[in-house]
Amino acid sequence: MDGKSKPGVPYGGMTDTWAKKHRLIYIGATRHPFILSIRDGTVDLSAFKRWLGQDYIFVRAFVPFVASVLIRAYKKGDESSGDMEVILSGLGSLNDEIAWFKQEASKWGVDLSQVAPEKPTQHYCRFLEELMRPEVDYTVATAAFWAIETVYQESFAHCLEEGSKTPPELQEACQRWGNDGFGHYCSSLRNIADRQLEKAASGSEPLVKVSEDVVSKAEVTFLRVLEYEVDFWNMSCGTAGHSAAPKP
Ligand SMILES: Cc1ncc(CN)c(N)n1
């Protein structure tokens, strides 16, 4: 999703509305200069290696977050929704992703045991921990989950589009998140988030206030994900003065 409806794919859930409403930051996260440099073949390989080491740390922290969403899906007890199956498949891919990072790191001569988390990585991982707290609503957690995966899907898919000059040695990395299967997985996550948001938005009295709070908390969480993603790309580029401060 790019905040616009795709040809032949009419879509109009809450997540789509947010992507359009917050288009500038959405584009900032999904068309970041780091991604554009991969796509046009000018990427600085030391930036790619920095990204690789930092993202390995992020992905390890992302696993317990996804597991926490799985537990919440189970506790909701709505077996017919199919949420658990989607989330479980995501956990399976993260297992492959971790193995891929290790393999890729050895290919590029990055010693993962020596990589220390930089500030933006620390802050993003702390944010994931906050989202694991029991008081965080399933709706908010699924919106964050969808946004985190979708930023990568849209970013790396852009590097594989026709006309891109992505260096051959980086194509596998782009395929990992830019492939159609990952795109379908992100659509399933979007459907889960949208269904939850819709339920919350149409919440019946007297829970109306609580439901409205959940929807606005989910939107704020979506924006925070985009900001953390931009900070993460900035750090990868080595952009001086990236805004790495923890968000309020
Ligand atoms: C920072 C970040 N954001 C998202 C993804 C996709 N799982 C990732 N690997 N790293």
Image: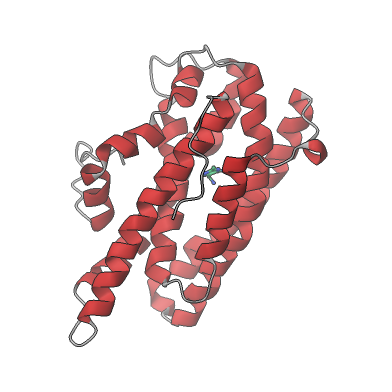
**Residue 146 appearing in the image:** yes
Number of on-image labels: 0
Which residue is painted at 51% across and 77% down in the image?
Answer: 74
**Residue 179 appearing in the image:** no
**In which image quadrant can residue 209 be found?**
bottom left
Left or right of 49? Residue 25 is: left
Residue 163 vs residue 37, the one in the foreground: 37
Which residue is painted at 34% across and 64% down in the image?
Answer: 217
Which residue is painted at 62% across and 25% down in the image?
Answer: 48
Residue 70 vs residue 233, the one in the foreground: 233
Q: Quadrant of the N terminus?
A: top left
Identify the colour scheme used: secondary structure
Spot occupied by residue 151 in the image (x, y as percentages of width and height): 43, 41
Spot occupied by residue 65 in the image (x, y as percentages of width and height): 57, 61
Spot occupied by residue 167 in the image (x, y as percentages of width and height): 56, 15
Q: Is residue 81 above or below residue 47?
A: below
Which residue is painted at 43% across and 16% down in the image?
Answer: 164
Spot occupied by residue 5 in the image (x, y as percentages of width and height): 20, 41
Left or right of 141? Residue 114 is: right
Q: Quadrant of the C terminus?
A: bottom left
Q: Is residue 240 above or below residue 68?
A: above
Which quarter of the frame holds ligand 1? Answer: top right
